[in-house]
Image (tube, rainbow, N blue to C red):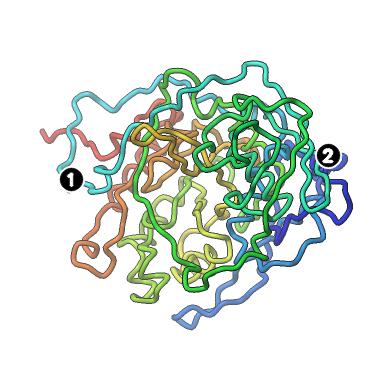
Amino acid sequence: MTSSDLPPSGSDGDINNTNEENVMEDGHTPGQGSVIVAKPDIESTPSENKKAKLYHVEVPAPAGAGDGAEVDGDEQMDEDQQDLVSSSMLYEGAPSSSIVDNTRDTASASSDETEEPEEEDASDNNTVQAVPLVEELEKIEEWWELKMTWSGKVFDLRVGGNDMVYDFRHLISTLTGVPPDGQKLINLLPGSKGKLSVEHDAKRFGTLGVKKGQKFVMVGTREEDRFKDKLGVGVQSTDDFDVTYSHQVKGIAPADDPRNKRMIQNIVDKVPITVMNEPREGKKLLVLDLDYTIVDTKPLISGALPSSECARPGLHEFLELVYPHYDIVIWSQTHWRWLESKLVELDMIGGERGYKIAFVSDRTTMFPVFTQRNGKPFEHEVKPLAYFWAHFPHWSAKNTIHIDDLSRNFALNPGEGLKIRAFNKAGQPEGMVDKELTKLGNYLVKIATTSEDFTTLDHSKWKKKPPRT
């Protein structure tokens, strides 16, 4: 991904020229998605002393990226993500071919089915139904042309009325390198004391009362120039609070939100897919989350357990079982460098297994959406399947299934999501007898061989089976 997106040294900060002549550097026309066939470029030696190939591609920096200080890509994982969510870098609409309508008639499994006795999933205690934000979308969206001055330079910003304040703050961060929490905005909002904080993130920009053509000043220090307490670097908190979405919602569904459509189209245009193994004709699409779905991540990263013991029991058998019916894609919030390293350690790529991974996708193809938690806006990231469908039109909601331990990742495609119990007990007696993948494999083979249209299925009932006679 890009190592830095800082403004040019001159005064031209117009970010509306990020897609100059609407042609990417590889000759690809935006809006269609681009696919790159991977070539092995790094050899890694796993613990089994077998050499495996790593595959990757660096996405070129968008035109107009500035001449700022170079920052190591690994340390800029979060900034890489933000490069893709700048509101004025987004297209004003997404083609209908890349955004799939989530409205459908959901048919459940047979009414005679009984649920198999199953150990209660503790994560369900932290899962609530998504509550839409109280807001109004602009049916005919308006756009704001603004001028921002920072550090003696002038930047032209274009912001949509349906964009979130979150998008606006991160747009400024992308242009200047000043993190959102360090931005003080003068003369943007009367009486706002100069700051748009996290509390404003879930508001639509069009509701703020900003005048069109407004000129304002931003005061703030770049991330790399700030004093940091090195003892605090790298400390991250985890939140297992989960949200479940339904495709039958009151009001506008997340997939139909104009802002989310632009986010998806921006990712389609900016982030090519690096193909490791070509998708096969007639195969359905299986999208698998990595962390805590097929591997216990904590001991894998810390080295507390051998890689083979961190994998969920039956992982390779599961993948070999479903491979004749599905092309397999791994989608993780991990940065691609760590993601591919994990897959090598798990012997999922570069080995001689009876399955192949088509390609992987990392956190740069995700973006945040907002719902409510305890009456307050709650932000979480999502995985839009339309990103894959835009690149490979033979896949759609009819032949795609997404497996994850967090149902909030299904926000844009709730009908295609199947939540699996989190695997976080590797090396413990409970983890060693985990049978989740065995059951899941049988279900996936069954629906692949009996259903022509997955939109008629209710995946929430995947563990149910016919009663014994």
The Cα atoms of the two marked residues, 2 and 1, are separated by 53 Å
Residue type at tag 2: Asn
Decide: marks 2, 1 in contact (CB < 8 A)?
Answer: no
Q: Secondary structure at mark 2?
A: helix
Compared across the picture, whether 235 is left or right of 216 comes to left
Instruction: Specify the quadrant that holds the N terminus.
Output: bottom right
Instruction: Specify the quadrant that holds the C terminus.
Output: top left
**Picture coordinates of residue 107, whole percent (x, y):** 35, 23
User: Which of these two is toward me, 117 or 144?
Assistant: 144
**Picture coordinates of residue 295, whole percent (x, y):** 38, 61
**Picture coordinates of residue 409, whole percent (x, y):** 45, 42
| Residue for badge 2 | 22
Compared across the picture, whether 317 is left or right of 279 comes to left
Question: What residue do we see at 44% from left, 65% from top?
Answer: 235
Q: Residues within 10 Å of mark 1 (few under 14, many from 20)?
A: few
Q: Is residue 247 above or below residue 11?
A: above
**Picture coordinates of residue 87, whole percent (x, y):** 68, 38
Asked whether residue 25 is in view, the answer is no
Residue at the far bottom in the pictured view = 49
Q: Secondary structure at mark 1?
A: loop
Compared across the picture, whether 457 is left or right of 30 comes to left
User: Which of these two is toward me, 241 or 264?
Assistant: 241
Q: Earlier in the sequence, mark 2 or mark 1?
A: 2
Asked whether residue 351 is in view, the answer is yes
Question: What residue do we see at 35% from left, 70% from top?
Answer: 299
- The part of the image, by quadrant, that contains residue 373 is top left
Q: Is residue 64 above or below residue 55?
A: above
| Residue for badge 1 | 118
Residue type at tag 1: Glu
Question: What residue do we see at 50% from left, 80% from top?
Answer: 50
